[in-house]
Image: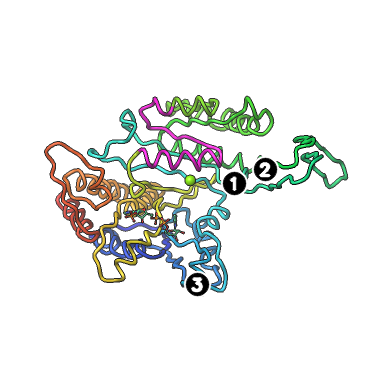
Amino acid sequence: MKITYKTPIVEMQGDEMTRVLWDWIKELLIEPYVELNTEFYDLGLPNREATGDKVTVDAANAIRKYGVGVKCATITPNAQRVEEYNLSNMWLSPNGTIRAVLDGTVFRTPIMVDGVTPFIPSWTKPITIARHAYGDVYKNSELKVNKGGAKCSVKIEYADGSVQEKPIADFGTDESGIIQGIHNKDKSIASFARSCFNYALDTAQDVKFGAKDTISKTYDHNFKDIFQDIFDAEYKDKFASAGLNYEYSLIDDSVARVIRSDGGFIWALKNYDGDVMSDMVATAYGSLAMMTSVLVSPDGKYEYEAAHGTVTRHYYKHLKGEKTSTNPVATIFAWTGALAKRGETENNTKLVEFAKRLERACIMTIESGVMTGDLALLFKRDGVTIKTVTSREFLLAIKDAFDKM
Ligand code: NAP
Ligand code: MG
């Protein structure tokens, strides 16, 4: 008897190699065991083009409605893709569109296996990075100063006619330089804070947040204050009864503490810090192919995916009929994340257990020495011989391990 559940999960198909893996994962690891009830959206680039990208907005609204989604990696078009797919428009990043609709925060967590040791060996537990994905330098306004005698300022003009202005720099006789204006919104920072605190309660992890409030006494300090106010008013008691901690520290200090830590917490970071630190943390844990990603909205909607892209290079080999050794683990974990969340929302322990068991089967398969090429380069475990396999052989080995459990 297959496992069933009531409310649909929003399924978003994607592009290239991950699109191929998507169907194989469903065929071999999910559909034999679970009676899938999904609302399906094809976010593959050809269908985004055919629908004028309406499909992406529809999918995002469906996640709002059903609360749980699972997404395959998708192409974000650039000039070369516009040509390759003969696009009428350089469609926006689907992840950006979905994030904007859900007002969510992305949490990235590495999947750890015995045999792939992080570059920081004391990191025995995963570090989850939460990056604030709105504003700051990503929505900036920049100018080059290119004449002498420049005086630069920031200025606010209110609708009621009042004005606030503050100098940035007086360039004097210097003839060249640069200036920049950035912004953020309290509403967005508050959503970020709530998403972090909710996800912390959800996954039973502490939250660390770092910013540069000592230097940026208005801008960064505002982040610090909003986090603290929301924590004190809405989360302090819940954290206390769950035995969890929220800790703010200066960003430099935060970095030092994270390096010395053993992991197992959520590291909340401003947009730029999160951009930089997520690449550092991903690399330190080993492989981008082992990084999961979940978008959490402040009102508790969840969208699961792999952190990597569509693995274009492998796809072109696949199209030529060559077998590829693309790692499907993060995409499998996107599915198990969504199924476990749906199990939780419906008190469906069978579904939750299925998801956890499938995750264990992936890890056991790798730890037994059977893995894709990316991991074979990193893996080292006493007494275990590495067998590098193709994507499909790997999925079959996971299925075998799962069936034996
Ligand atoms: P990518 O797809 O993540 O792949 C970059 C390289 O990382 C691959 O060529 C491969 O290295 C390695 N890699 C990534 N995932 C792997 C896996 N599962 N198994 C084995 N190796 C893996 O990034 P990209 O090539 O820069 O981007 C390709 C497309 O994906 C772009 O169109 C981009 O817009 C899109 N993208 C989508 C998302 C998303 O939907 N969330 C995120 C990022 C990028 P080797 O070639 O050395 O084997
Ligand atoms: Mg980055």
Q: Residues within 10 Å of mark 1 (few under 14, many from 20)?
A: many
**For the point 30% across and 30% down, which residue is it?**
121
- How far apart marks 1 and 3 lie (CA) works out to 30 Å
Quadrant of the frame with the N terminus: bottom left
Q: Earlier in the sequence, mark 1 or mark 3?
A: 3
- Mark 1 vs mark 3: in front: 3
Q: Nearer the viewer, residue 286 or 98?
A: 286
Instruction: Give the residues in magenta.
Output: 258-284
Residue type at numbered disc 3: Glu
Task: Give the residue furthest to the right.
Answer: 161
Question: Residue 378 placed where, x, y %?
Answer: 26, 43
Question: What residue does disc 1 label?
Answer: 134
Question: What residue does disc 3 label?
Answer: 83
Is ligand 2 closer than 8 angstroms to the Cβ of mark 1? no
How many numbered discs, if any?
A: 3
In the image: residue 139, left or right of residue 258: right
- How far apart marks 1 and 2 lie (CA) works out to 11 Å
Q: Nearer the viewer, residue 401 or 274?
A: 274
- Would you say residue 1 sits in the magenta stretch? no
**For the point 40% across and 36% down, which residue is it?**
127
Q: Is residue 68 above or below residue 150?
A: below
Label at residue 182: 2
Task: Give the residue furthest to the left.
Answer: 383
Q: Residues within 10 Å of mark 2 (few under 14, many from 20)?
A: some
In the image: residue 92, left or right of residue 39: right
- How far apart marks 3 and 2 lie (CA) works out to 33 Å
**For the point 37% across and 31% down, which residue is it?**
263
- Mark 1 vs mark 2: in front: 2
Residue type at numbered disc 2: Ile
Magenta portion: prevailing SS class: helix
Q: Is residue 274 above or below residue 7?
A: above
